[in-house]
Amino acid sequence: MESSLTLSRAPAGEAAPRPARQRIADDKAMLRAAAEATRDLIAPRPGIYWADLIASVVVGYGALAVAVTAAKTGVVVLAAMVSALALYRALSFIHEVSHMKHSALPRFRGGWNALVGVPMLVPSFMYEGVHNLHHAKTRYGTSEDPEYLPLALMKPWTLPAFVVISALAPIGLLIRYAILAPLSLLSPKLRTTVMERYSALAINPSFRRRAPEGEARAMWNRVEAAASLWAIAVVVLTATGVFPLRSVLIALAIGSGVAVVNQVRTLVAHLWENDGEPMSVTAQYLDSVNVPPPALLPALWAPVGLRYHALHHLLPSLPYHALGEAHRRITAALEHGSPYHKASYAGLPGLVNKIVRSTFQPR
């Protein structure tokens, strides 16, 4: 969901220096090698997608059931952590859904919405038609990119605010689907506002999404109705005592945990050093981040291929299960001086430290 927080840039009258990355030309050798090395990895493997999704859902909801029913605090905390990580993995498939050709994975989008999107109040339409704008060569890093803010060029306080505000996501989603969605049916003006401002997983507060058309509009209406009915049911069943308040609060805390982990992952998915100018594909790649093995923890905080975010920007059509092999092939094919190797980082602490230090630099 779009953040209502307006993050400050350089003070008025003080222009932030233009990062040199904006002027980087495309490295044709890297682009050619990446394409040639991965031609046989394009096809998604349905068995992997379904098995991974179902396993994540079973673990996530199973641990959630333990967390909301257990009496011992230690068991609740442990189960909640397991649930948050598993549901975060399941939710991360929305990224794959936004990129895939649905004919290659029949019924996967519908299955994902039924198992994850609707129950967690993050249906696929909140990313489809939005995320593709982030990959548009002329939009990436500009004011028209829904998923970009020059965080590294902003004030130091913006980083903790960027993460902390995400903890409110479950409450915001309940309000959006239980209250605003049904009310918007009575007011065309409110309906426009809900569709433009509260129907996208975006971090750029100036982004306004366009209403979908045709089959996309019909799908949106069906899935939004299901999410709205579920949200209303949660509110009503909690208010009437059918759902114990303690259990609902634990579930909301788990949802907040999912949102915070994702926001931290977003914080280090890019270097966020572009201040609005269009960038070449190579420049976009270098502004993005890979956290490849031997690091192990990225498998938890950057699941479903998100640990290869820079590579994904280079080859957005590759399915998530092919990114590891693609990275190994491209790394072996390109000499040490290639820009490809410059987008790989050791882990989360170093990346967080890098962006924090950037915000303290004089501009």
Image (cartoon, rainbow, N blue to C red):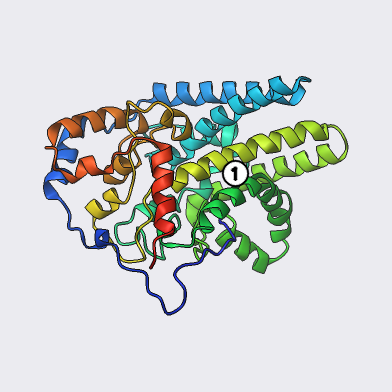
Q: Is residue 1 visible?
A: no
Residue type, mark 1 in image: Val
Choose top left, top right, bottom left or bottom right for residue 141: bottom left
Q: Residues within 10 Å of mark 1 (few under 14, many from 20)?
A: many
**Res 303 seen here:** yes
Seen in the image, is 166 located left or right of residue 142? Answer: right
The residue wearing badge 1 is 223
**Outermost residue toward the right?**
240
Q: Position of residue 318 (x, y in %)?
A: 30, 36
Front position in the image: 112 or 91: 91
Question: Can you say whether 335 is above or below 353 in the image?
Answer: above
Q: Is residue 216 above or below residue 279?
A: above
Q: Where is residue 62, by image quadrant?
A: top right
Q: Which residue sits at x=37%, y=39%?
A: 101
Disc 1 is placed on an element classified as helix
Q: Horizontal and vertical percent for residue 280?
A: 23, 57
Please tell me which residue is depicted at 72% across the width and 33% down the height of the picture: 250
